[in-house]
Amino acid sequence: MGRKRAIAVAAAGLLAATTLPCGAVVFESSGDSSRNTTPPTGAWAGSGWSNVVPIGAFLGTVIHSNALLVARHTDLGVGSTFSWDGHTYSVTGLADDVAADTDLRVLFFNGGLSNVARLQAASDETGRWTVVQGRGRERGSTVVSAGRTNGWKWGAATWVRRWGVNRFEGYADLWTNGDSLLAWASFDAGMDSNECMLSEFDSSGPAFVNAAGGWRCVGVASYVDPALFSPTGSSTDQFVATCFDYGGLYYWGGTGAWYYADPAAGPWPCIFLISRVAPRLGWLTNVVPGLVLRDDPPRRAGTAVVVR
């Protein structure tokens, strides 16, 4: 799978590639805007809700006492602020994954938080259930083609924090064949009542998996594919949507053309893609010494510094 578009809408219009940056958690089973807005319970309890802070219109995962992991394409950076537990923190530095040119960014802030997430070091996400978080657009109006429901248009941006679940189905390449810098999951109708898809402003939200007896962050939300559709294959009636089956619609491809999704060859679910931390642990441990990895005992990390 080739380069993906970030989950966002450009100021001058939609981004031109087939994928877009991520937004609000959208559920197949319900359009209730208050669904899953409090910490997960039951089988999903402890799955990272307390390790994440709202910052700007997005989310950041606390990976060190003074470091957040975010999506690079959100442009969160020096001068950004966030509040947690009655205190306000300011971002004073950042580090981008320039070597691999991934969507990962670390923000350093003036403080010492203790709600540090542990990171997944092993490349074993495929087949695992994941709990993801995001903020942003509600589920909009229903998309119907040839009498069948395809999904929902992106609705209002409310920046409400929600969580949902899905299952990783494999890896995808970002720049070169076999780099496996992304993990993907599809929006399969009826898989679980909490199954979700991502859309605009879900970017930077974390994905957690339960591995080795505890919940670990495997990366941040970066892309959805596809997101731009048309009933006729024309830009005059195009729209952005989250679909569990876009059969019967045209979708915008990365080669700059519309393609028809034949219902007979379906189903055609949208997918979301996570920028993975496991392949980039060398870079992360260089810029943030003392990271808590999957098999490490829980501990509070010291103060991190940016290594130039």
Image (cartoon, grey):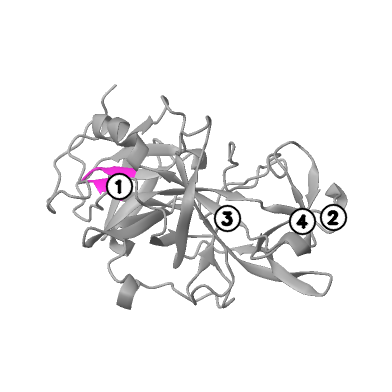
User: Which one is in front, 260 or 265?
Assistant: 265
Q: Amino acid at mark 1?
A: Tyr
Q: Amino acid at mark 4?
A: Ala
Which is in the foreground here, disc 4 or disc 3?
A: 4
> What mark, if any, has residue 271 been given in the picture?
3
- Cβ atoms under marks 4 and 2 closer than 8 Å: no
Q: Which residue is mark 1?
A: 89
Label 3, secondary structure: give it.
strand
At mark 1, the secondary structure is: strand
Q: Residues within 10 Å of mark 1 (few under 14, many from 20)?
A: some
Q: Nearer the viewer, residue 157 or 95?
A: 95
Nearest to the eye among marks 2 and 1: give it. 2
Placement of the N terminus among the 4 image quadrants:
top right
* Mark 2 vs 1, N-terminal side: 1
Q: Earlier in the sequence, mark 3 or mark 1?
A: 1
Residue 142 visible to the viewer: no
Residue of label 4: 261
Q: Position of residue 16 (x, y in %)?
A: 71, 39
Which residue bears the numbered disc 2?
Answer: 237
Picture quarter with the C terminus: top left
Question: Magenta segment range?
Answer: 62-68
